[in-house]
């Protein structure tokens, strides 16, 4: 369920996906593997920092995985704001799929992979998480973050592909399947802006970027 509007309203939430990694470029499932940014990802993060800083955030919270932390640190340097770490904003755990290419997953789990691509809430890699699991932990973190965010202020959450969609789903009170069809995923070092209005939260932008392109390749959902 989306958070209740703050008295006075006007809060904003920036959900930022981390920059590109070598696994992203190669189409390898990362899940919760702690894969660092590639040189391209570092360039993306360093360009995104000032662009996101221009949105005037007052808090920055990040997943504890290094690719999200490095991306958040770029925003922190540009704003002078201390970056807070919350492991609940980690990526979905992809179970046995972690470290495998998209082709390897498709060959080993064809039905489960097809269901995931259709937006069905299946458990990744047999023993990983569902999007419902991610929504629960992300929602708990957002409850705490937004309860402490005063009216008129803005928070940045530096996170991951599937987790970023869970953030938007929770804040906008969207069904996960609807969010899959409507939003898809954020590109590497792309962000979305959610704004609080008189009657609740609204999507203002999605998949904005500083313009530094990713390498050829596909990033698994």
Image (cartoon, rainbow, N blue to C red):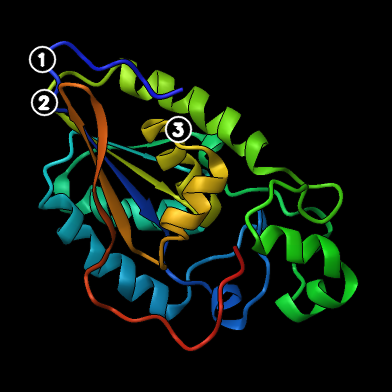
**Does the residue at mark 3 contact the one at mark 2 (Cβ under 8 Å)?**
no
Res 146 quadrant in image: top left
Cα gap from disc 3 to disc 2, whole angstroms: 20 Å
Cα gap from disc 1 to disc 2, whole angstroms: 7 Å
The answer to whether 6 appears left or right of 89 in the picture is left
**Does the residue at mark 1 contact the one at mark 2 (Cβ under 8 Å)?**
yes
Label 2: state its secondary structure.
loop
- Whole-percent x, y for residue 62 in the image: 42, 42
Specify the label residue 8 is tagged with. Answer: 1
Q: Quadrant of the C terminus?
A: bottom right
Please identify the residue farthest to the top as the structure is shown: 7
178 vs 40: above or below: above
Specify the label residue 152 is tagged with. Answer: 2
Q: 168 and 15: which one is in front?
A: 168
Query: Badge 1 local density, few (<14 within 10 Å), some, or many (20+)?
Result: few
Tell me which label, 3 or 1, sits earlier in the chain.
1
- Whole-percent x, y for residue 216 in the image: 48, 89
Please identify the residue farthest to the right as the structure is shown: 108
Res 85 quadrant in image: top left
Residue drawn at point x = 57 percent, y = 34 percent: 135
Q: Is residue 177 visible?
A: yes
The total of numbered circles placed on residues is 3
Cα gap from disc 3 to disc 1, whole angstroms: 21 Å
Q: Is residue 98 visible?
A: no
**Does the residue at mark 3 contact the one at mark 1 (Cβ under 8 Å)?**
no
139 vs 204: above or below: above
Q: 171 and 59: which one is in front?
A: 171
């Amino acid at each position: 369920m989306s958070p209740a509007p703050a008295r006075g309203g006007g809060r904003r939430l920036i959900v930022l996906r981390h920059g590109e990694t070598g696994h992203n470029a190669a189409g390898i499932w990362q899940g919760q593997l702690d894969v660092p940014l590639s040189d391209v990802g570092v360039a993306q993060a360093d360009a995104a920092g000032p662009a996101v800083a221009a949105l005037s955030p007052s808090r920055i919270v990040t997943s504890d995985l290094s690719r999200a932390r490095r991306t958040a640190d770029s925003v922190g340097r540009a704003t002078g704001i201390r970056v807070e770490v919350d492991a609940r904003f980690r990526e979905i755990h992809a179970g046995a799929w972690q470290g495998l290419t998209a082709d390897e997953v498709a060959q080993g789990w064809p039905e489960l992979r097809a269901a995931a691509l259709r937006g069905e809430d299946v458990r990744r890699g047999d023993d990983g998480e569902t999007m419902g699991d991610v929504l629960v932990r992300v929602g708990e973190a957002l409850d705490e973050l937004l309860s402490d965010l005063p009216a008129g202020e803005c928070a940045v959450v530096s996170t991951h592909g599937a987790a970023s969609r869970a953030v938007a789903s929770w804040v906008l009170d969207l069904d996960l399947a609807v969010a899959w069809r409507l939003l898809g995923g954020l590109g590497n070092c792309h962000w979305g802006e959610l704004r609080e209005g008189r009657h609740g939260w609204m999507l203002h932008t999605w998949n904005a970027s500083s313009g530094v392109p990713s390498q050829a390749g596909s990033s698994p959902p």
